[in-house]
Image (tube, helix red, strand yellow):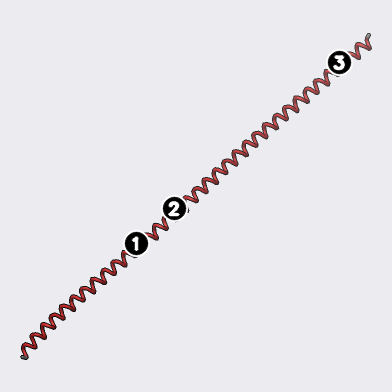
Amino acid sequence: MDSSVDSSSSSINGVNSKRIRSSIVVVIVVVVVVVEVVVVVVVVVVLVVAVVLVVIIVVVVVVVVVAVVVVVVVAVVVVVVVVVVVVVAAGVVVVILVVVVVVVVVAVVVVVVVEVIVVVVVVVVVVT
């Protein structure tokens, strides 16, 4: 009887040993799967954060470029307007100066002609 108890006890221990090994394998597989899932989740989160940061940076760059273009366009428009105003003002000043010179020259010519006529009339009246 002793030997039958021994053999049944050792078979029970063999089954228990196989179960323990199987449990250890299951635990290791579960731990590996959990670690892999955590790694995948971390990688996905990092990728999402990276994409969001890249999108934010691109948006900021686009906004800055658009702002610079708008400022340059406004500056060019202001410079063009100033140049046009200065050219028009200079033209108006030149026209005014030409008109003043013409008026002064005509006035001087009229005065000289009138004085010559007066002198001629006076001389004719005095001589005759």
Q: Quadrant of the N terminus?
A: bottom left
Q: Quadrant of the C terminus?
A: top right
Identify the residue shown where x is 5% and y is 89%: 3
Q: CA distance from mark 3 to mark 2?
A: 87 Å
Residue 67 in picture, x, y percent from top left: 52, 49
Quarter of the figure with residue 102: top right
Mark pair 1, 3: CA separation: 108 Å
90 sits to left or right of 41:
right
Of badges 1 and 3, nearer the viewer stands: 1
Up/down of 86 relative to 50, above or below: above
Position of residue 41 measured from the top left corner of the image (x, y, whole percent) = 33, 64
Task: Check if mark 3's residue and mark 2's residue have beta carbons within 8 Å.
Answer: no
Instruction: Name the disc covering residue 117, or none.
Output: 3
Q: Amino acid at mark 3?
A: Ile
Q: How many marks?
A: 3
Give the residue pinned by disc 1.
Answer: 44
x then y, percent, for residue 103: 77, 25
Question: Residue beneath label 2, please?
Answer: 58
Please name which of the two marks, 1 or 2, marks the residue nearer to the observer.
1
